[in-house]
Image (tube, rainbow, N blue to C red):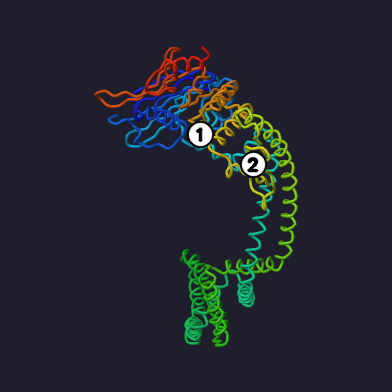
Amino acid sequence: MLTHLHISHYALIESLDIDLRSGYTVITGETGAGKSILLGALSLLLGGRADARVVKQGEQKCVVEATFSLEGIDLTSFFEENDMDYDTAECVVRRELTAAGKSRAFVNDTPVLLSVLKPLGAQLVDIHSQHQNQLLGSEEFLLQTLDLVAANDQERGAYAQAYETYRAAQQALSALKSQAERDAKEQEFLRYQLQQLSEFQPQVDEQESLEEEQILLSHAEEIKSGLYQAVQLLSGEELDVLQQLRQSMLALSGVGEHLPQATELVERLESARIELGDIIDELEQQQERVEFNPQRLEYVDDRLSQLYHLLERFGVENEAALCGQLVELQQRLDAIENMDEEVVRLTREQEQAYAALLQAAQMLTATRQKAATTVAADLTERIAQLGMPNGCVEFSLSARLEPQADGTDTLQLMFSANKNVSPQNVQDIASGGEVARLMLSLKSYTARYRQLPTIIFDEIDTGVSGTMAECMGQVMQELSHYCQVLCITHLPQIAALGDEHFRVYKEEDAEGTHSHIVPLSQEERIAEIANMLSGSEMTEAAINNAKSLLGL
């Protein structure tokens, strides 16, 4: 629960510190005194939108800080998930906003993002204002309420898992059908591409070999003539280099006895003769292999031209990539041809997932139907105590056309305030006062299930007065047995039932206008309620009436 609140330099508030206790606390004050400012500061603290205009004029920043007792609630998992230190006794939340619009938030002095502050605030405080009465027409809110009472975490978890499986199967089938439509349009083109590559039959590393052969065939006559001349110069009739080497070796051998180096020179000449012989043999072989072949040259030119064209067309760099394209095209066409079988398989999977989803939905719906009967009966009883003895509350639960993430149920709150009048959608039939009482009844009933530490009611008594106001105060007083209740009200009947009473007022001085909030003593409380009863002129009758309301 909220145990301490500090506000500084927020709107008309210079500095404010209040201590709060458990039970039922009321806050009163004249219109414009600053009750909405107090609520705005709390909303900022809990992760609301930051507007630099709320920083008190002339100040650098405003600060809102609250201390919460965590007795009776367990936030261990939340703090662990967000990597924050957890104190089981209390939690201190602080929000700072500079005049330049920069906002910072802290939990137990640890900086946090709004994405952390908001869900934490939702687990600590529920601020219920007039506009939240519209939630009675919200299907999401009503479903959450029934789920809370039904305690159907297991059924909702099973449904959520089944829904995820169904959606995945649905998306997979949809994607496959879309792919099938696209592939059907491309099928002929894919076949044409496959035919091109299949007819060409690309070979790995073929380009280099063909380019070398192209050069050779293009210059065959020139190459053959050069080889012929080289052979003739080395072993022709006019000049036989091999024969001259042999003669040189014989000449040197004859002087070997007189010149020791001659033997070594003969060996070197023999090596040269052997190497030169090999060269001449290679030249002759190359000469025989080289021939002018216009038909082969035309084939090589055409092959290379096709290869260059296919490389450019398919946007790849080499023949290996072309071979990969050939395999890929064949696989895509095979997949297209087998698409019907895959569609059948995924359709069957979707049908199975849908059947499992409906089964999980039926179990979830059953828990909601049971809870709806219980909640409707209790609300009918509670609104009877709030001045609607002939009132009737029902939940209209029916099936949606399509499953959604939160189930297959569509839900409306049906209401009738009069006898023999069939219940209708609460949005269409209920007055503002009736909606306020309905919402209060629902809040008070679900409080025991929510285990929410603090609920703040902001002038939800609009359209209510007299005895009904007292009844609403009694409901809030009863609600305070389950959680801390703070109520901002203009009605003395509601204010008189509070365990603790604060008054908001504003005053003006040389520096400007300031809002304050103070706890009231018993005498001050009598005066405040009497003032609420009689207006600006305090009367003895009003004072006596105030004492009567306070049970004095």
Mark 2 or mark 1: which is in front?
1
- Residue 337 left/right relative to 323: right
State the image coordinates of residue 454 (x, y, percent, origin top left).
53, 25
Q: Amino acid at mark 2?
A: Met
- Residue 472 left/right relative to 501: right
Image quarter for residue 327? bottom right
Q: Which tag, 2 or 1, sits closer to the chain's start?
A: 2
Is residue 121 visible in the rendered image? The answer is no
**Mark 1 Cα shell of 10 Å, populated few (<14), some (14-19), many (≥20):** some
Residue 208 higher or lower than 69, as above or below = below
Image quarter for residue 434? top right
**Mark 2 Cα shell of 10 Å, populated few (<14), some (14-19), many (≥20):** many
Q: Could you tell me which secondary element the residue under label 1 belongs to?
A: loop
Q: Amino acid at mark 1?
A: Gly
Asked if the residue at tag 1 contacts the one at tag 2, i.e. Cβ–Cβ closer than 8 Å, the answer is no
State the image coordinates of residue 36 (x, y, percent, origin top left).
42, 31
Give the label on residue 52, or none: none
Residue located farthest toward the left when viewing the structure as drawn: 510
Residue 31 higher or lower than 369, as above or below = above
Is residue 57 visible in the rendered image? The answer is yes
State the image coordinates of residue 152 (x, y, percent, origin top left).
69, 35
Q: Nearer the viewer, residue 93 or 175?
A: 93
Q: Could you tell me which secondary element the residue under label 2 belongs to?
A: strand
Q: Nearer the viewer, residue 46 or 529?
A: 529
- Residue 142 left/right relative to 528: right
Residue for badge 2: 414
Image quarter for residue 332? bottom right
Residue 438 higher or lower than 324, as above or below = above
As measured in the structure, the alpha-carbon distance from the residue carrying label 2 to the one carrying label 1 is 20 Å
State the image coordinates of residue 489 (x, y, percent, origin top left).
47, 27
Residue for badge 1: 463
Q: Nearer the viewer, residue 470 or 508?
A: 470
